[in-house]
Image (cartoon, grey):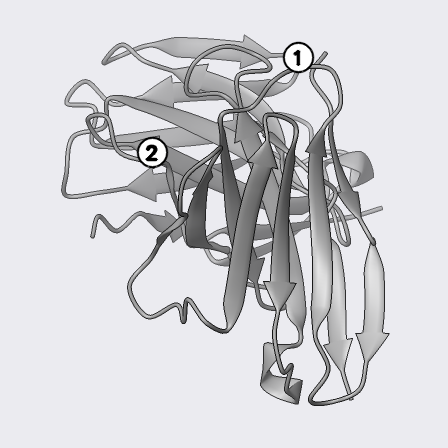
Amino acid sequence: GAVVSQHPSWVICKSGTSVKIECRSLDFQATTMFWYRQFPKQSLMLMATSNEGSKATYEQGVEKDKFLINHASLTLSTLTVTSAHPEDSSFYICSATGGNGANVLTFGAGSRLTVL
Amino acid sequence: TQLLEQSPQFLSIQEGENLTVYCNSSSVFSSLQWYRQEPGEGPVLLVTVVTGGEVKKLKRLTFQFGDARKDSSLHITAAQPGDTGLYLCAGLFGNEKLTFGTGTRLTIIP
């Protein structure tokens, strides 16, 4: 079946630094990928929709300059958390459509970011 | 923004008991999915329901889509510790992106 890989699975960084998280579709092409944020014991909140070859579409309240998204190829989207602060600590999850049919999302295993 | 309310928010029961989790919205879904998520991992799709009144079974799990396509339920029979996890419903409204429910955290006590 379709597989989405996220890297790194966990990262710890100092406040003020930038962190890049990669999301790859391993065996299918994903024209659309989604980035979510999940706080402990809560549901997934959609941050942005990443479209290959075009600008990402951000949800209301998500800072575009804070969370940079690049979807340079049909198999890779990246999320960069710029000038990270402790409040950016969270579990970030990506997903992609196209691997198991329309409107079926395949999720990555998530990336846990801790900002000290 | 569509809102999907799940209930209960938390549920802790003994192994072998039955349980039902609900997902409700004021809007009509085009389709609805149920996911299970374990700590430190991404959600895993359990089922997709499309037709009002549809019932799908996955071993001890029974999923039902409401006739009006505004609600859904997940029933687990003879719960086992391996069923522990965060259960999420996610609805597709028209051609928009999936909206996730508030989640139900289930703990099965051996």
Q: Position of residue A22 (x, y in %)?
A: 72, 47
| Cα distance between the residues tagged 2 and 1 | 23 Å
Sort mark 1 into few (<14), some (14-19) or many (20+) by Cα contacts within 10 Å: few
Q: In the image, what residue type sits under mark 1?
A: Lys
Residue B56 % position (x, y): 47, 10
Q: Nearer the viewer, mark 2 or mark 1?
A: 2
Q: Please name the residue shown 63% across and 82% down the image.
A: A83
Q: Secondary structure at mark 1?
A: loop
Position in image of residue B52 (x %, y %): 23, 13
Taking the image as shown, residue B30 lies to the left or right of residue A62, namely left
Quadrant of the rendered image containing residue A54: top left
Q: Are marks 2 and 1 in contact (CB under 8 Å)?
A: no
SS class of the residue under badge 2? strand
Residue B91: image tag: 2
Classify 10 Å Cα crowding around label 2: few (below 14), some (14-19), many (20 and above). many
Please state which amino acid type lies under the numbered disc 2. Gly
Query: Quick check: B52 left or right of A61?
Result: left
Residue occupying the point 44% across, 27% down: B33
Residue B23, position as x, y percentages in the image = 35, 40
Q: Residue at x 26, y 51 (%)?
A: B3
Residue at the spot of label 1: B59
